[in-house]
Image: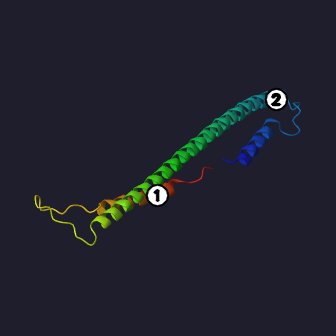
Amino acid sequence: MGELQVNQMDQAAEKVLTPPGSDGLDGGGQLEAGGREESILARQVAEFRQERERWELHRQQEVERLREEGDLLAEAWQRLEAEERCLLAERELLRRGAANRLPNSMPAVSQATGEKPQTGGHDQDHLDWQQFQRLRREFQRNNRPAT
């Protein structure tokens, strides 16, 4: 509910509490009934104002919590990107080093096990890259500015 709507409701409630031309000279029974209605309306207006204050406090707390979570996510994302840059740089160095040691040669088959040794973990690099991309999309999807 917007603040303008809340103010309009307050003004309407005040008008009901003190109707124009009401001077209290309209008869004893009507005055007493009017007093009860005023008392009920005054209580309802007070309850409404208290509820509005509780709601506003809760809203402010939620906004602050969301800001803090956004800051934490942004920091985590920056750390993740920095780690990715370091990992990619290390892998590139290892790849260059392996290429310099074994130029244009295919990996040898292990005589003991009959298996090929891994050559720098290309499959793992690809999986790491895909995971990084998923995390990036998730972060971007959830990184909405706080209102």
Residue 36 placement: quadrant: top right
Check the image and report above or below for 17 versus 90. above
Q: Is residue 104 left or right of residue 31?
A: left
**Which residue is at the front of the view, 95 or 102?**
102
Q: Earlier in the sequence, mark 1 or mark 2?
A: 2
Q: Residue 119 location, x and y as percent?
A: 26, 63
Residue, far bottom: 104
Q: Is residue 40 left or right of residue 25?
A: left
Residue position marked by numbered label 1 in the rendering = 136
Residue at the (21%, 61%) spot, across then down: 117
Check the image and report above or below for 45 versus 124. above
Number of residues whose C-alpha sits closer than 10 Å to that of mark 2, classed few (under 14), some (14–19) or many (20 or more): some
Residue 48 placement: quadrant: top right
**Which residue is at the front of the view, 79 or 146?**
79
Check the image and report above or below for 112 versus 61. below
Q: Residue 121 location, x and y as percent?
A: 29, 60
Q: Residue 126 location, x and y as percent?
A: 34, 63
Q: Residue 131 location, x and y as percent?
A: 38, 58
Residue position marked by numbered label 2 in the rendering = 31
Name the amino acid type tagged 2.
Leu
Instruction: Label 1: state its secondary structure.
Output: helix
